[in-house]
Amino acid sequence: MSAITRSVQAMDLLARKGPLGVRAVAQQLSLPLGSVHRLLLDLSEEGIVDRTPSGEWELSYRLLEITGLQLERIELPRLFRP
């Protein structure tokens, strides 16, 4: 499984189940704890995830920012044409 696939799976899990510890993420994705820890640190360095005061991981607002940039580029009337 590629690093991108693991990253997307982790982001999807955090979006659905919201703040989780590294062990919970590793268990739910069936990945080694060390790999998940490194993955979350990498995502954190890119501003994609943040640590809560209790030490769990959650998605940051960076994804909304990225999505917003894409939405600005989409021509909505074109999407709704038959």
Image (cartoon, rainbow, N blue to C red):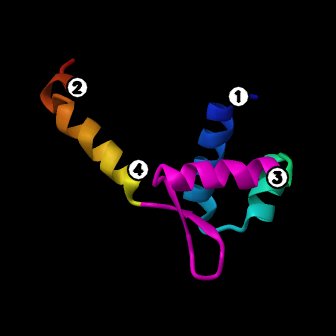
Residue furthest bottom in the image: 54
Q: Earlier in the sequence, mark 3 or mark 4?
A: 3
Q: Disc 1 versus disc 2: distance between alpha carbons?
A: 32 Å
Q: Earlier in the sequence, mark 1 or mark 3?
A: 1
Q: Is residue 63 left or right of residue 13?
A: left
Q: Disc 1 versus disc 3: distance between alpha carbons?
A: 16 Å
Q: Earlier in the sequence, mark 2 or mark 4?
A: 4
Q: Disc 2 versus disc 4: distance between alpha carbons?
A: 22 Å
Location of mark 2 (residue): 79
57, above or below 13, in the image:
below
Q: Disc 4 versus disc 1: distance between alpha carbons?
A: 20 Å
| Magenta residues, start to end | 34-60
Q: Earlier in the sequence, mark 1 or mark 2?
A: 1
Residue 55 x, y percent position in the rendering: 66, 75
65, above or below 72, in the image:
below
Residue count near mark 4 (Cα–Cα under 10 Å), binned few <14, some 14–19, many ≥20: some
User: SS of the residue at dot 4?
Assistant: helix
Residue 46 x, y percent position in the rendering: 48, 49
User: SS of the residue at dot 2?
Assistant: helix
Q: Earlier in the sequence, mark 3 or mark 2?
A: 3
Say the numbered circle drawn on residue 34: 3
Location of mark 4 (residue): 63
Q: Is residue 38 left or right of residue 76?
A: right
Q: Disc 3 versus disc 2: distance between alpha carbons?
A: 43 Å
Marks 1, 2: nearer the viewer: 1
Residue 63 x, y percent position in the rendering: 41, 50
Quadrant of the drawing holding the C terminus: top left
